Each structure stands twice: as structure tokens, then as C-alpha cells.
Image: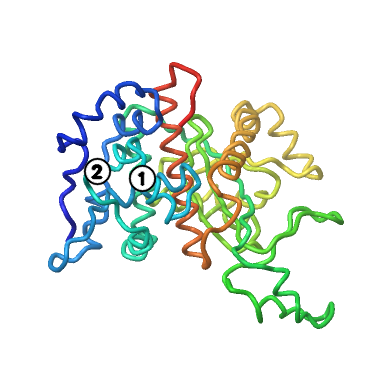
């Protein structure tokens, strides 16, 4: 069971006394997000995760919005609750009056444990449904890519008892996150190497919305996850949602899997694939997807610079996956607001 969300807008002290603050900041991201999005889907998607009897929990929308604030402003669970207690705009966004007590920060972890990965996946796709309800047309063209996420592990400390170059078990003996793995970017000497995870995404080439997310340990190859990304979105949004699939050279080798799903393979051929390179050279759909690939890199750069995407907040693959889902979900919300309610003045958040 959870409490009804009465909150900010139903409180005279919360709404009337501070409405002038909201009115002066109509271009604030949280105000635009709150006014644009119909948040009623959150309760319906997680209701089955709550018992029908017993002590009343905080309304799930309150905790879900705290998670959005946490990822939007790159805060810890403790700090996001402290800041929400002090910040009028945060209170307005989560729907609590100035006299309401903000949930204790431990409620955020309990919420994630309660609803689990499946519910977060449903919430991720409900945001895409909300985009379409608002009139945003998601195309059938996708670009896939992957990026590194460093594990929350002190690798230098794990090295202390390494018994020479032939000792390949030093990390498994000492790691605090056994789900993580070693990954490399490139084969040249001095190539980037990290211990942690990979975040794999598919992105709509038209709207730049992320449409599928997978999280693996860092050793998993990019190309091996393409079919999984495609199937995840098709299962959630329908088999006709993807018709053209792009990606860099790491995704070569998926042509047959894509063909079986009725999808055209527009991944970038390797340099030695002369015949395929010649066939795609003048294909306008292929060239369009190729020229849009930089938008995926830009999405990763945004996530790493502003939203803690490059480093795991938690330990364990499922927790890192939830972190990724929430990060992309939040960035999709930002993108929806930008597309439909662009800023009238030069300001962010």
C-alpha cells in the first residue's frame, strides 16, 4: 500500500504562497517537465509491487521523481533528499508541500529493490509512449553503440597480492564487484582498458531518443548485443518499430540476424569489405544513418559529463543496469521537453 499523493499543489502553503516562484521560472527544466508530462503511468506500472495491506509507503511517484532529480543533477541518494528538503523547485517537482517531510534517503534504495528491473524497463518504455502521445514521431531508423562504465572497485587495492603475470585470478580473489569484467577499446598498444561494465544502447536517428538499453560486463563485444537491443525494443514497442539499423564497424556480422527480423543492415562495413562498401556508398538511407552516428557519441558525452554515466554508483550488474536505465530515461525526458518546449532564454536546468 502507498499513501495518496496530496502534496504541493493541494496545499495552500505549498501552492499559493510559492506560486510566484514557479511563475517566475517557467523556463526552468523541472517546471517544463512537470507541466508537459502526464505522470499517471508511474503508479499504474508499479502498483503490483506493493502489498494491498500493511503500513502505507510513500507514493511511488515521489520516489521515482527523486530518482530523476538524483540522475539529473548527479547527486547521491542522501544529498538529493537533503536538497529536496531545502529547494522549492525540487519540492514542486516531486509534488510535496513545504510542510511535508521528505522521504529518508534509504527509501530510494528500498524502492529500487521493491520494483526491480522489469518495472524500471516498463517505466523506460512508458516515457517513449508519452513522447508519442505528445506528438513526437519516433522513426524506424536506429544507431547502436556502447560505452564504458568503470566499476565501483579499487583496482589498485586488488593488485596487492598479484603473483606475477601468469596470475589471472587476482581480481576475482579481491574484487568487491564480481559481476564486472575487463574491457579494452582497440587493439593497439596503449589502448584504453578498464574494469567494469559496458552500456549498450540503440538510439532513434531522428529524435535522438534512446530506445533500448543493455548492460554487460566490459568483456562482452559490442556487436554481440545488437540483436538483444533490437529484440528488447521490438518486444516492448512492436515488431515494426525498427526497419533500418546502423552502427559502427564493431556491429558487422549481424546482417543475417537483422534480415530475419525484417531489418535492413546499415552498419558501417570494415575497410576490407570492398563489395559491401561499394553497394552502400550511394545508399541515401545508409549515408543518413552514418552521418547521424555522432549523436550517439554526444549522448554518451552528456551522460558522462553531467549524469555520472561513466562510473557505477553501485555494485552488481542489475544495479548498474538500473542506473543506466534511469540515466537514459532522464535524458529522454530532457530531450522530449527540448523538442516540445524549447527554451525561450539561454538557460539550462
The crowding category of the residue bearing disc 1, from other C-alpha atoms within 10 Å (few below 14, some 14 to 19, many at least 20), is: many
Q: Horizontal placement of 16 versus 144: left or right?
A: left
Report, in whole angstroms, how far the alpha carbon at label 2 lies from the one at label 1: 10 Å
- Please name the residue that numbered disc 1 is placed on: 84
Residue at the right extreme of this rendering: 189
The residue at which mark 2 appears reads as 96
Query: Residue 27 falls in which quadrant of the image?
Result: top left
Residue 349 is tagged as none
Q: Is residue 143 left or right of residue 4?
A: right
Q: How is the image coloured?
A: rainbow
Q: Is the N terminus in the top left, top right, bottom left or bottom right quadrant?
A: bottom left
Q: Which residue is painted at 69% across and 40% down in the image?
A: 268
Residue 1 against residue 261 in the figure, above or below = below
From what the image shows, is residue 107 above or below residue 326?
below
Q: Quick one: label 2, few (<14), some, or many (20+) residues within 10 Å?
A: many
Q: Mark 1 or mark 2, which is nearer the start of the sequence?
A: 1
Based on the displayed image, in which of its 4 quarters is residue 168 positioned? bottom right
In-front residue for pair 348/243? 348
Residue 167 sits above or below residue 13 on the image: below
- Residue 213 in the image: above or below residue 112: above
Report x, y in % for residue 205: 53, 33
Position of the C terminus by quadrant = top left
Name the spot of residue 6 as percent of width and height, x first. Answer: 16, 44
**Could you tell me if the residues under marks 2 and 1 are in contact, i.e. CB atoms within 8 Å?**
yes
- Where is residue 45 shown, x and y percent of the image? 26, 52
Query: At numbered mark 2, what does the secondary structure look like: helix, strand or loop?
Result: loop
Q: Is 221 or 241 nearer to us in this picture?
A: 221
Please give the name of the residue rendered at 44% of the width and 34% of the height, measured from the top-left corner. 334
Amino acid at each position: 500500500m502507498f499513501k495518496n499523493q496530496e502534496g504541493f499543489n493541494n496545499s495552500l502553503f505549498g501552492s499559493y504562497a510559492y506560486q510566484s516562484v514557479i511563475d517566475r521560472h517557467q523556463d526552468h527544466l523541472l517546471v517544463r517537465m512537470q507541466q508537459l508530462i502526464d505522470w499517471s503511468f508511474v503508479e499504474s506500472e508499479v502498483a503490483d509491487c506493493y502489498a494491498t495491506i500493511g503500513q502505507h509507503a510513500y507514493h511511488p511517484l515521489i520516489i521515482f521523481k527523486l530518482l530523476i532529480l538524483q540522475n539529473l543533477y548527479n547527486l547521491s541518494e542522501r544529498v538529493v533528499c537533503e536538497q529536496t528538503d531545502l529547494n522549492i523547485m525540487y519540492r514542486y517537482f516531486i509534488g510535496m508541500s513545504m510542510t511535508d517531510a521528505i522521504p529518508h534517503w534509504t527509501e530510494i534504495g528500498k524502492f529500487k529493490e521493491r520494483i526491480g528491473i522489469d518495472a524500471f524497463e516498463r517505466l523506460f518504455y512508458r516515457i517513449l509512449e508519452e513522447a508519442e502521445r505528445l506528438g513526437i514521431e519516433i522513426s524506424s531508423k536506429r544507431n547502436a553503440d556502447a560505452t564504458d562504465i568503470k566499476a565501483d572497485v579499487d583496482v589498485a587495492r586488488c593488485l596487492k597480492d598479484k603473483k606475477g603475470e601468469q596470475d589471472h585470478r587476482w581480481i576475482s580473489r579481491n574484487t568487491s564487484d564480481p559481476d564486472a569484467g575487463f574491457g579494452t577499446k582497440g587493439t593497439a598498444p596503449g589502448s584504453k582498458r578498464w574494469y567494469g561494465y559496458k552500456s549498450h544502447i540503440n538510439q532513434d536517428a531522428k529524435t535522438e531518443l534512446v530506445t533500448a538499453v543493455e548492460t554487460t560486463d566490459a568483456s562482452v563485444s559490442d556487436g554481440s548485443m545488437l540483436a538483444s537491443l533490437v529484440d528488447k525494443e521490438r518486444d516492448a514497442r512492436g515488431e515494426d518499430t525498427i526497419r533500418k539499423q546502423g552502427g559502427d564497424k564493431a556491429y558487422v556480422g549481424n546482417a543475417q540476424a537483422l534480415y530475419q527480423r525484417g531489418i535492413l543492415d546499415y552498419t558501417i562495413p570494415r575497410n576490407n569489405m570492398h563489395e559491401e562498401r561499394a553497394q552502400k556508398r550511394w545508399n541515401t538511407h545508409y549515408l543518413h544513418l552514418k552521418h547521424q552516428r555522432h549523436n550517439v557519441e554526444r549522448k554518451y558525452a552528456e551522460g558522462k559529463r553531467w549524469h555520472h554515466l561513466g562510473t557505477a554508483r553501485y555494485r552488481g550488474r542489475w544495479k548498474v543496469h538500473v542506473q543506466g536505465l534511469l540515466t537514459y530515461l532522464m535524458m529522454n525526458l530532457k530531450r522530449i521537453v527540448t523538442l516540445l518546449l524549447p527554451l525561450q532564454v539561454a538557460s539550462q536546468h
